[in-house]
Structure formats: structure tokens, C-alpha cells
């Protein structure tokens, strides 16, 4: 994603009750609603719309779905990297990011990803 592009993140949740609310986070901090970061909800689809992104907007964006009446909550996250238009692309860079997993405590996980670039990688 390049500096100046628009960004829309969408979280769709089947069977979400009306008492559920979604909080958008960036790097584990709540994103305040303002003209630069708009929120929309249509039925069970929640959107975060950023009109124009900048490199300092890069980070881990999360959607935290919380019940207003119970302690139930669900979290989903993704990484967003914004490159300045006047800079060379990152080398190496991710072609495919690792996917998240849900595990029982003590469970084993294996992650895979794909990288591209001319820099030696391990």
C-alpha cells in the first residue's frame, strides 16, 4: 500500500447480536473516530475507512468485537504496511504473510510465509 492511498478494513460477523459492539485498534490502542478514520456498520458488517494513509499509519490493525452485556469478546488482526511514495520498496518484503491460528494452551503452531527480494533471507 502506498502513501496517499485509501484503506478500508471490513469485519463481517455472522449471527452478531445487537448488543455487540466493535472497537477498532491500531497497535493495541483504540482508534478515535474522526474525519480521517470513519466507522460504518451495516447489519453485521463493520468497516474502518481511512481516506488517506501515511507511513506513520502502518501497524497492526485489530477489530475487537465485544458484548455489552457479557464478558464475551473476539479479536481479529492484520498488519498494514504503508510505503512512502518517494522511497524504494522494502527489501525483502512479504508476498504472503503468516496466517493467524487459534490454539489450546500448550498447543503447537507452525507458520508459513513467502518473501521476495534481493537481500539474503533465512
Image (cartoon, rainbow, N blue to C red):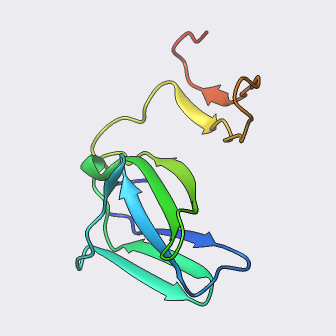
Please, is residue 7 above or below residue 99 in the view?
below
**Relative horizontal placement of residue 20, taking residue 106 as reference (left or right):** left
Instruction: Identify which residue is drawn at 58% across, 63% down.
Output: 72
Spot occupied by residue 82 in the image (x, y as percentages of width and height):
38, 48
The image shows residue 71, relative to residue 44, as above or below, that is above
The quadrant in which residue 121 appears is top right
Q: Position of residue 2 (x, y in %)?
A: 39, 54
Q: Classify residue 44 as left or right of residue 38.
A: right
* Residue placed most toward the observer, 57 or 54: 57
Q: Residue 30 is drawn in which quadrant?
A: bottom left
Where 104 sits versus 31, above or below? Answer: above
Q: Quadrant of residue 95?
A: top right
Determine whether, in the image, residue 12 is placed left or right of residue 87: right
The one of 6 and 104 positioned closer to us in this rendering: 104
| Residue ID at (54%, 18%) | 118
Question: 45 and 70: which one is in front?
Answer: 70
Quadrant that contains the C terminus = top right
Rendered location of residue 32, percent (x, y): 25, 69
Amino acid at each position: 500500500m502506498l502513501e496517499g492511498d485509501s484503506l478500508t478494513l471490513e469485519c463481517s460477523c455472522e449471527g452478531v447480536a445487537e448488543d455487540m459492539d466493535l472497537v477498532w485498534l491500531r497497535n493495541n490502542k483504540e482508534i478515535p473516530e474522526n474525519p480521517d478514520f470513519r466507522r460504518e456498520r451495516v447489519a453485521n458488517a463493520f468497516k474502518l475507512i481511512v481516506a488517506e494513509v501515511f507511513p506513520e499509519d502502518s501497524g497492526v490493525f485489530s477489530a475487537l468485537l465485544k458484548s455489552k452485556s457479557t464478558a464475551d469478546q473476539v479479536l481479529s488482526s492484520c498488519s498494514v504496511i504503508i510505503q512512502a511514495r518517494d522511497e524504494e520498496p522494502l527489501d525483502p518484503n512479504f508476498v504472503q504473510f503468516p496466517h493467524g491460528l487459534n490454539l489450546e494452551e500448550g498447543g503447537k503452531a507452525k507458520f508459513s510465509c513467502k518473501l521476495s527480494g534481493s537481500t539474503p533471507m533465512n
